[in-house]
Amino acid sequence: MWAGPLMGIIALVTGWLYWRAGDEAWQTMLFTVLTLSQMGHVLAIRQERESLFRTGLLSNRLLFGAVVLTTLLQFALLYVPFLQDVFGTQNLGVTHILIAVALSTLIFWIIEIQKWVLRIWERREKGGADERA
């Protein structure tokens, strides 16, 4: 329930900071951060408790394919001139892309850490229940 607003805040703050700096690609950065954040989010929430690192990227090939396709389409919007005209996007340099990817992974890492804490909590609860029985 909190992930959507957090993704929006991260994307909006990114766009605002680039706008304040006078970077003409601020809208493209906002759009890219939001899109890539959603890809990280969907990968992270695939399993309620297990880490993506345990289940593996290819454990759901259709989901992985959808993430790859969406990411490729996002990059097409950034670098294909016809699509740039239609969507009003601009080329992003390597630095912009690296920053967008780093910011976009924040939601993924937060969810993975949340699942890790939940697993620890459940193990402790289970251990405590066994001792009381």
Image: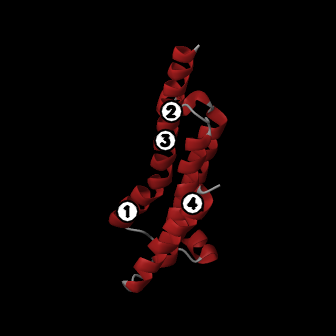
Whichever of labels 4 and 2 marks the residue nearer the N terminus, that label is 4
Q: Which of marks 2 and 1 is nearer the N terminus?
A: 1
- Which mark, by number, is residue 35? 4
N-terminal-most mark, 4 or 3? 4
Q: Nearer the viewer, mark 4 or mark 3?
A: 3
Callout 3 amino acid: Glu
On the question of residue 90 being in view, the answer is no
Decide if residue 49 is on the left or right side of residue 92: right
Q: Depth check: 55 or 28 in front?
A: 55
Question: Disc 3 and disc 2: Cα gap in Å?
Answer: 14 Å
Is the C-beta separation of discs 4 and 2 under 8 Å?
A: no
Secondary structure under badge 4?
Answer: helix
The quadrant holding residue 60 is top right
Q: Distance between the residues labelled 2 and 1?
A: 33 Å
Q: Mark 3 points at which residue?
A: 112
The amino acid marked with disc number 2 is Trp
Rate crowding at label 2 as few (under 14), some (14 to 19) or many (20 or more) other CA atoms within 10 Å.
few
Q: What residue is disc 1 on?
A: 99
Q: In this view, does 105 lie to the left or right of 66?
A: left
Please, what secondary structure does the residue beneath circle 1 have? helix
> Badges 4 and 1: C-beta atoms under 8 Å apart?
no
Spatial CA distance of label 4 from label 3 is 19 Å
Q: Quarter-wise, where is residue 6 in the image? A: bottom right
**Amino acid, disc 1:** Ile
Residue annotated with mark 2:
121
